[in-house]
Image: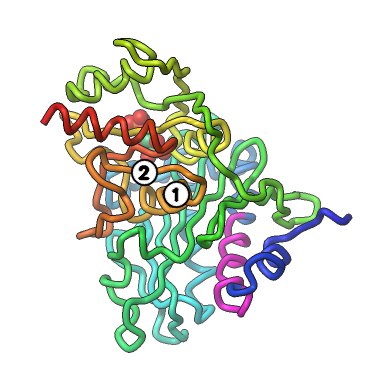
Amino acid sequence: MENLVTIERFILENQPEYAVGDFTYLLYDIALAAKAISAKANRAGLIDILGRAGTSNVQGEQQQKLDIYADQVIRRLCDHTGRLCVMASEENESIIPIPEKYPKGRYVLVYDPLDGSSNIDANVGTGTIFGIFRCKDWETRGRLEDCLQPGRDLVAAGYVLYGTSTLLVYSTGSGVHGFTLDPQLGEFLLSHKAIMLPAQPKYYSVNHGYQSKWSVSIQKYVRWLQGRDGSTFGLSERYIGSLVADFHRNLLDGGVFFYPALDHKPAGKLRLLYEAAPLAFLIKQAGGYASDGERAILDITPTSLHQRVPLFIGDRKLVEQVEYFNRRER
Ligand code: P6P
C-alpha cells in the first residue's frame, strides 16, 4: 500500500506551497469532474451518451452529448466553491460568471471540456484540457480580462486523457506529474512522477490530408522531419486526430505535434487560451517548447476567448527548426 500516492498527498509532500487549501481543492474539483466524465466515457456504448446532441457550439462544430455533459460537470462542480471568480469553456461563447449567490475566489479556470469528441463513437481517446490563472485584480475579479492572459501567467495547467485508462497530468510549475485513476479505489494515484521529454524524439504528428494546403516552409519542414533533403532525422509519423492523445504520446516518447496554418484555415484550428497555452505550459516544464511557428505560445496574449493559433509543440530542437524554415521563407 506504500505507493498509494494520491494527488493530495503528492501536493502535501512535494509542493507544500500549494497545500494551503484553495489551490489543492481546485485540483481536486477538477479530478472529481474527471472521474465523472471518465465514468460516462467508459460506458459510452452502453448509455445514451454517444453521438451528436443535435446542437453546435460557438465554433460551429457539432456538439456531442458527452461534450455537453463534460462541460456541465466541470461548471457545476466548480461554480459554487468560492475558489474561482470566472470560467471560460470551449463550449461557451462568452465567459462563465460565478452565480451571484456564490462567493468569488481568486482563481480563473479556462478549459476544453472534451477535446477530440468527434472520436468518441470510434472509441478513440479524448481529453479535457485546463489552465488556471490568478485574477488580475481582486477588486474587479471575474471579468473577461481575467481570462485573456498569456500562457506565461498560468499558475497551473493539465489535461485528463480518457484512454485505455484515465490519466490526469498536471503541472504547477514544478515539473509534470501524472496520476492514473484506479477505478476500484476511485482515486487518482501517482503513476508518472516528473515526466521529461526523451532526449531522442521518435514521432512527428500532423494531418497529411492537408498536405496540399501547407505553405512551402511547412512542406520543407516535413521533408526535414522525414530525414530527406540531407536531414539527419527520420521520424515515424503518428497522428490520432485527438490533441490530448497525440500530445501525451509525444510527451512520453518524444517528438513534435503540429497543426499549422492552412490555406483555408490561416490561423490553424486549435484554440490558444484553453488548448495551446495550457499544453505549452506543460511542455516547457517537461523540457520542450511550443510555438505558433514564429514565437513562443506562452508569450501570446489572447485578444478573444476562442482565438485560434497555429501550434507546433514538443521537442525544442524540432519546434525551433520550423521557426527557422519560416524565417527563411519570409
Ligand atoms: P483534423 C479534434 O477535433 C481537434 O480539435 C483536436 O483534438 C485534434 O488535434 C484536431 O482537432 C484534429 O483536426 O483537422 O486533423 O481532423
Q: Nearer the viewer, residue 302 or 297?
A: 297
Residue 125 shows in the view = no
Report the quarter where the N terminus lies.
Answer: bottom right
Residue 210, given in percent of the width and then of the height, sits at 27, 22
Real-space Cα distance between discs 2 and 1? 8 Å
Amino acid type at mark 1: Lys
Residue 157, given in percent of the width and then of the height, sits at 48, 57
Q: Which residue is mark 2?
A: 290
Q: Which residue is mark 1?
A: 284
Q: Residue at x 27, y 71 (%)?
A: 144
Q: Nearer the viewer, residue 112 or 323?
A: 323
Amino acid type at mark 2: Ala
On the image, which quarter does residue 153 sit in? bottom left
In the image, residue 206 sits, relative to residue 71, either above or below, namely above
Q: Residue at x 44, y 44 (%)?
A: 115
Say whether residue 173 is left or right of residue 207. right
Residue 287 shows in the view = yes
**Does the residue at mark 2 contact the one at mark 1 (Cβ under 8 Å)?**
yes
Q: Main secondary structure of the magenta part?
A: helix
Indicate the secondary structure of the residue bearing disc 2: strand
Q: Nearer the viewer, residue 33 or 48?
A: 33
Q: Which residues are magenta?
A: 19-34
